[in-house]
Image (cartoon, grey):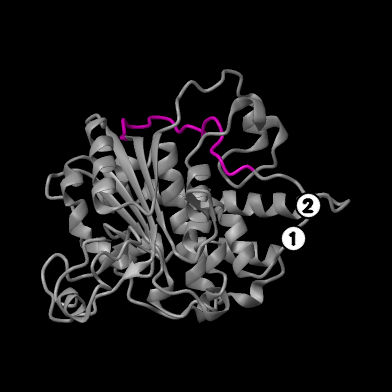
Amino acid sequence: MNADVTPRILSHRLNSERPREENERPSLSLQEIVIVGNSEKQVKFSELTLDMFRMLQALEREPEEYQPYILENSADFTGDQMKKETAPSKKPNPHKYLLYKPTFSQLFTFLASGFKELPHNAVMLIYLSADGHGVENKHVDGPYGQGGVRMSAHKGLQNTGSTTRIMQSNVNDTNIIYPDDLMPFTRKAMMLIVDSETSTAFQSLSSGFGQSVVILMSPCKVPHTLQDAIRKGNLFTLFLHNPLVAFLYICNIANVQVELWEQCCQQLRGFEGDWTRLFTKLSKVIDVSYIQMIDDEFLSLMIRRFIFCYYVTRQHKAFKGMEYFPSCSPSLPPQIMENDDLRKRVLTLASTLDVRGLFYELEDIPSVSVTM
């Protein structure tokens, strides 16, 4: 907000273009997006949950006519760079499907439709925000024994009688999306984002067709102080939507002055710039799936914000253990995920907001086994 306590409007859409590096290599581009929501307790607008709405905004370019009137969102584009842009971007937004509580057949139909329209040099992004389904029967093995996420709220025959309930306990729920349900669509490049308490079940998904597949998974747990806020949307999606707002949220900061906001944006730009340079430096040891996707502005945005989410939760004292951190597949090397220069950036941002006491100092960060 301004000094006169009047609120300012934030844009959560991508600006016209990101700065380009010299000698950029040809890359995959995002063309089809399937956004799926089924969080029972979450606030929704018509047929959109709050998570769906946030991802829809994050995966849109800001219209040219609105850019001079908005407050800068984060590190995507600086004011000076915006002024230097003269020609409007002609690149269209990716095509999107929005599905609220779809049945399995509905989801499969739209995935197949998006898959059909996908050229060989493009990526389909699948975003799942849904209540988790754990494995109740420990004797269930195979590709459907890892758990999944719930789709349609319809319970079918589950409540029709005791005999049916007994049968249901021995088979897989047909309204659950399991990792292997998505295997056919890995015949083309894919980014999968899962925000659920059973997100890590999807780390077993891999492509058997030589295509690039990247999976970004939410933490399986959140601190007790944040559990009651699930109606306001999931924390992982908030980081993907607006990482600075998510940072303020976990630090219990409700309002900031415009000048302070701009300082924080500068700090976030520094973090993302350092990470991008580190990524380029270590590109030879990073999985090719990331290399092929990193040059697309939307896919790069998701990866960078995922990394920021990891570093923040890794250093925040309320997040205690690997289940509280996001994870990814294929794994990224420790040089990327446990870098002291990036940790210092997080601490500098915390100092700017006067909340450094909520975060571990470098020498105090608990050691964990990074197998992301």
User: What kind of secondary structure does the magenta stretch mostly adopt?
Assistant: loop
Specify start and end residues of the magenta stretch as a single range: 11-28
Residue 195 x, y percent position in the rendering = 40, 61
Task: Name the side, left or right, on which 186 lies relative to 303.
Answer: left
For residue 12, which quarter of the picture? Answer: top right
Q: Secondary structure at mark 1?
A: loop
Task: Please say if the residues under marks 2 and 1 sit with CB atoms less than 8 Å apart.
Answer: yes
User: Residue 223's mark?
Assistant: none
The disc label shown at residue 255, or none: 1
Q: Amino acid at mark 1?
A: Asn
Label 2 element class: loop
Q: Residue furthest front?
A: 161
The picture quadrant where one finds residue 32 is: top left
Count neighbours of disc 1 (C-alpha within 10 A) and say few if under 14, some if 14 to 19, many if 20 or more.
few
Q: Position of residue 140 (x, y in %)?
A: 13, 76
Residue at horizontal 22%, vertical 31%?
120
